Amino acid sequence: MAQVYRSGQLYRTGLPARMTPHEVRTRTFDPRRRGVDPDQVRQFQARVAEDLADLHRRIRTLAEENARLKRALRDWQTMHARECRSANDGHW
C-alpha cells in the first residue's frame, strides 16, 4: 500500500478499515451524570448494526458482479480480437 503525505501527515491510501456490525452492537460508552436511556442506545445500535451488515452484503454482491462483468468483457475482447485478426490478414 502506498504512503502519501498530506498536509504534513503520513497516511496510507486504500480502503479504510470497516466497522463491523458486531463492533456497533457491543460498543460501550462511559456513564455520565445526565446520560441517555441505555435501552434507546441499544435499540439504535441494533438498527445501525443491521444497516451496516446490509451494506457489507451489498458491497460483497457488487464486488462479485463487478468481477463477473470484468471476466465477461475480457472474454468478449479476446473473442473479438481473434475475429478481427483473421479478417485483416492479407496485403493491402
Image (cartoon, grey):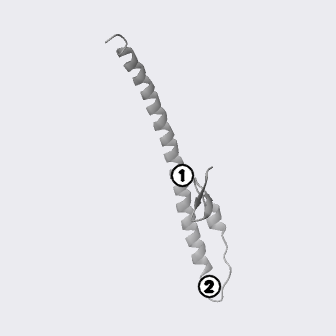
Badge 2, how many Cα within 10 Å: few under 14, some, many 20+? few
Write down the quadrant of residue 26 in the picture: bottom right
Q: Which residue is located at x 46 percent, y 31 percent?
A: 74
Can you name the residue that lies furthest to the bottom here? Answer: 33
Image coords of residue 64 (percent x, y): 52, 42
Q: Secondary structure at mark 1?
A: helix
Q: Which mark is residue 35?
A: 2
Q: Which residue is located at x 57 percent, y 72 percent?
A: 43
- Rendered view: 75 above or below 32: above
Q: Which residue is located at x 52 percent, y 56 percent?
A: 55
- Rendered view: 91 above or below 45: above
Q: Which residue is located at x 50 percent, y 51 percent?
A: 58
Q: Secondary structure at mark 2?
A: loop
Which amino acid type is marked by label 1? Arg
Q: Is residue 91 left or right of residue 40?
A: left
Badge 1, how many Cα within 10 Å: few under 14, some, many 20+? few
Image coords of residue 46 (percent x, y): 58, 67
Q: Is residue 83 left or right of residue 60?
A: left
Q: Is residue 40 left or right of residue 92?
A: right
Residue ID for mark 1? 57
- Rendered view: 88 above or below 66: above
Cα separation between marks 1 and 2: 34 Å
Residue 32 or residue 2, whichever sits in front: 2
Write down the quadrant of residue 84 in the picture: top left
Residue 68 or residue 50, whichever sits in front: 68
Image coords of residue 49 (percent x, y): 57, 63
Can you name the residue that lies furthest to the top here? Answer: 91
Image coords of residue 48 (percent x, y): 55, 66
- Rendered view: 35 above or below 67: below
Query: For the C terminus, which image quadrant?
Result: top left
